[in-house]
Amino acid sequence: MLKVGLTGNIGCGKSTVARMFMELGAYTFDADAIIRTFYQEKGEVYRKVVEAFGEGILDKEGNIDRKKLADLVFLDINKLRLLESITHKALYERLEEEFRRLPQDAIAIVEASLLVEKGTYKNYDRLIVVYAPYEVCKERAIKSGFSSEDFERRWKNQMPPEEKLKYADFVIDNSGSLESTQKQVKKVYRELLNLVH
């Protein structure tokens, strides 16, 4: 099995690229979506997060309000580190469980924002970086519902995309048309298939 990390800055279009890989036959996992599942399951991760940050992060139904939580942690680097230490350990355990279910010749792609910043890209056989310049990322993020302040806070927590490219085995430039991105994804997928077979 080939484990591939897929990363890039906020607004670069990681999810779009992940979906294209999935359509070609890769098994894709979205780290953020898995963490959201932990919150919904209200198990150990939920309990630890509420213990760490207080009931002020809950909505009326007792669910974790991700916006309230983000507002809290993006203002304080230590709180952000604490949240990551709770969620990331559980995330890696869940991913390992998922990987064990996959066929031997599977290409497993994990979409996550901070693979380079956290050094966890080293857990993967290959790293794909999705690139788009700052202006394009900002415009897309705002279109998808982020406020300008939200975008800037998250952007500041991420390594500049140009810097990230140095870590990439493959770069997908997603600043142009969808057709252009699709072409690049197909080319990378063919190369990944060669590594598995």
Image (tube, grey):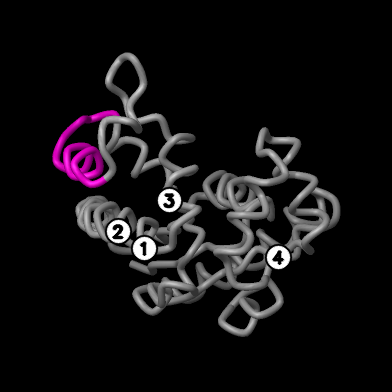
Residue 82 has which mark?
Answer: 2
Residues 153 and 120: in front is 153
Residue extent of the magenta highlight: 40-52
Mark 3 near mark 2, Cβ–Cβ under 8 Å? yes
Question: For the C terminus, which image quadrant?
Answer: bottom left
Question: How far is mark 3 from mark 4, CA to CA?
Answer: 26 Å
Q: Which residue is mark 1?
A: 78
Residue 129 rendering spot, x and y as whole percentages: 61, 68
Tell me which amino acid carries mark 1: Asn
First along the sequence among labels 1 and 3? 3
Residues 84 and 192: in front is 84
Q: Main secondary structure of the magenta part?
A: helix
Mark 1 near mark 2, Cβ–Cβ under 8 Å? yes
Q: Secondary structure at mark 1?
A: helix
- Mark closer to the observer (1, 2): 1
Mark 4 Cα shell of 10 Å, populated few (<14), some (14-19), many (≥20): many
Residues 134 and 64: in front is 64
Residue 133 rendering spot, x and y as whole percentages: 79, 64
Quarter holding residue 172? bottom right
- What residue is drawn where x is 44% and y is 48%? 30
Residue 96 rendering spot, x and y as whole percentages: 23, 58
- Mark closer to the observer (2, 4): 2
Q: Which residue is mark 4?
A: 131
Mark 3 near mark 4, Cβ–Cβ under 8 Å? no
Q: Say how many tags the image has.
A: 4
Residue 80 rendering spot, x and y as whole percentages: 39, 57
Mark 4 near mark 1, Cβ–Cβ under 8 Å? no
Q: Is residue 51 magenta?
A: yes
Quarter holding residue 54? top left
Q: Secondary structure at mark 4?
A: strand
Q: Which residue is mark 3?
A: 73
